[in-house]
Image (tube, helix red, strand yellow):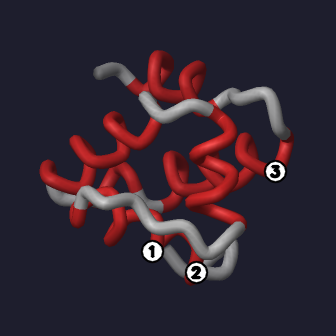
Amino acid sequence: MKEAQLRWRCRRGMRELDLLLLRYLDDAYPQAPSAEKSAFVRLLDEPDDKLWRYLYADCVPVDSSLAELVLKIRSVSPSSF
């Protein structure tokens, strides 16, 4: 998937989600292994309410690759991907 398409898919209905997802796209996605890139694309398929729970609450996806990515996105500061 092209970066412009991913950037568009990162734009959600909540500014907080936009910021986290776009930060990951800009800072970590380019260097991420292909499995992590695939997980990110799958994560973007989730509805906003689930993404909110994954990234801002204690909810973790059942899929282990999504769970690992969510924990990575949650745990890093803006410049430490």
**Relative to 47, residue 20 above or below:** below
Residue at horizontal 22%, vertical 42%? Answer: 38
**Spatial distance from mark 1 to mark 3, Cα to Cα?**
16 Å
Left or right relative to 25: residue 36 = left
Residue 64: percent from left, percent from top: 23, 65
Q: Find residue 21 and name its label.
A: none
Residue hosting label 1: 72
Amino acid type shown at disc 1: Lys
Residue at horizontal 39%, vertical 59%? Answer: 61
**Spatial distance from mark 3 to mark 2, Cα to Cα?**
15 Å
Residue 51: percent from left, percent from top: 59, 47
**Label 3 neighbour load within 10 Å: few <14, some 14-19, many 20+:** few
- Front: mark 3 or 2: 3
Amino acid type shown at disc 3: Glu
**Relative to 1, residue 44 above or below:** below
Cβ–Cβ below 8 Å for labels 1 and 2? yes
Callout 3: SS: helix
**Spatial distance from mark 1 to mark 2, Cα to Cα?**
6 Å
| Between 19 and 54, the one nearer to me in the picture | 54
Amino acid type shown at disc 2: Val
Residue at horizontal 43%, vertical 29%? Answer: 45
Residue hosting label 3: 16
Residue hosting label 2: 76
Callout 1: SS: helix
Residue 74: percent from left, percent from top: 58, 73
